Image (cartoon, grey):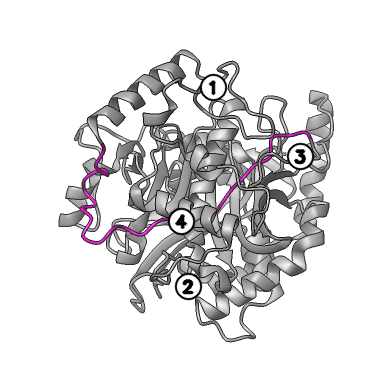
Amino acid sequence: MASVVEYKGLKAGYHCGYCDSEEGKVSCGMWAHSMTVQDYQDLIDRGWRRSGKYVYKPVMNQTCCPQYTIRCRPLQFQPSKSHKKVLKKMLKFLAKGEISKGNYEDDPMEPTMEDTVAGDFGLINKLDIQCDLKTLSGDLTESFDSEEKKKGKSPKKGESNEFIQSQDIEEKLGSGEPSHPVKMPMAPKPGKGADLSKPPCRKAKEIRKERKRLKLMQQNPAGELEGFQAQGEPPSLFPPKANKSNQPKSLEDLIFESLPENASHKLEVRVVRSSPPSSQFKATFQESYQVYKRYQMVIHKDPPDKPTVSQFTRFLCSSPLEAENPPNGPDCGYGSFHQQYWLDGRIIAVGVIDILPYCVSSVYLYYDPDYSFLSLGVYSALREIAFTRQLHQKTSQLSYYYMGFYIHSCPKMKYKGQYRPSDLLCPETYVWVPIEQCLPSLENSKYCRFNQDPEAVDEGRSKDPDRLQVFHKKAIMPYGVYKKQQKDPGEEAAVLQYARLVGQTCSERMLLFRN
């Protein structure tokens, strides 16, 4: 099935959830009736992001708080001191029920879902009704059934596998699959007075060891090093060394440290497909929604009638992404998932994620406010990084963790820069630039082109808009044919703006629905 999108154009002068400006926000958006994971991967690599089925792109040189797409490189990731503290705190809590003292309320926090697309919130409600055109899906199905028959494709598999990862790694997993941990988009808070423009300090010895490790990985990119997968444990990225004592612990060592027989608590992380909803997702929907509702009321101070089931469904369960289960892909398949954190048989947090061809992309995290002391924002981000590393072992091109947007001008959003190494997306040429190189420029100006080569251009730009695919009156046609039937001069401007924002490749693959 091809992606089908309805471009909604530019929206300017509305409320910003980051700086609270009443009319500083500027973005372009489209409603995605359906979208392939490859198209969404290509769109997020051009600065787009989804909220439910609404896909939007900030107008970077006009909006009050420029939002730069940020990705972490999990294969080289080293947890910082503050990350290790959070992981140790969780282990102590699980092992002995210990609750550490101290200020944990300043766990970093995303703005609410509707803040991220603030002025679009009402629009999305309307679009949900207007755009779920039954006729559209019917027309499309007809167009595609004939195409697929020609190609002789088999129908999609139904429900994908679901994964459970227990903190108690000795336990044999019922599915026989290595289970998966995962989390959502919150991240660690910068240390007091931390200089964000510098990577976290590390000893020279540690750096040499990391280089050696990376060399091993390059020789064996799929991570298939023999003899190092412990029973019931997620495969470790690196083989064990004889001199384990002075080796810095890996992220996996810190997360999956074995617990005593009589541990006070048991934590399991389950990945369940949210779209289309799997049986496990449906069975836990109500419990998951109640956690979301409490989170919005306590953490974001929503009134009790605001976090409704329909709002929860629209933003965090509905997704335009088509589920795909290719043989060389991850065992759980590609698409949209909820990563559920189960403590002693109850859901205490949920990370909403998309699994795409090259990355795990964080969408949102919500958690039970009673467990704020566990710094679940940071903990879940670290679990998601470990999850990405795990998926990489089978699917070697899946090697990045996208954390959404980095907003340098908003202090509460700068924490994402603490997961190193990470890159920001240049808003003009769409190349990735290490964050250390971007920060000095961002100190001087909210909007920056990160690509230092003045000659560089957007290589994926729209070069031939006539080849863009349009879906109009039950027929699929190139824009070159469609425009000859159009009299409205505004129509051409809208289509060309869309082509420029999505780039040539997506414009030729996705179907632009015009009414």
Foreground tag (3 vs 2): 3
| Residue 314 vertical placement versus 175 (above, below) | below
Q: Is residue 485 visible?
A: no
The circle drawn on residue 119 is 2
**Residue positioned 48% across, 48% down in the render:** 382
The three-letter code of the residue at mark 1 reads Gly
Where is mark 1, residue-wise?
223
SS type, badge 3: loop
SS type, badge 4: helix
447 or 270, which is in the foreground?
270
Q: Is residue 213 visible?
A: yes
The circle drawn on residue 155 is none
| Residue 112 vertical placement versus 187 (above, below) | below
Q: Are marks 2 and 1 in contact (CB under 8 Å)?
A: no
Q: Where does residue 229 sit, x and y in percent of width and height?
A: 62, 25
In the rendered structure, the answer to whether residue 140 lies left or right of residue 101 reads right
Measure how far apart labels 4 and 1 are at the Cα level.
26 Å
Q: Where does residue 221 sit, x and y in percent of width and height?
A: 50, 19
The mark that comes first in sequence, 4 or 3, is 3
The three-letter code of the residue at mark 2 reads Gly
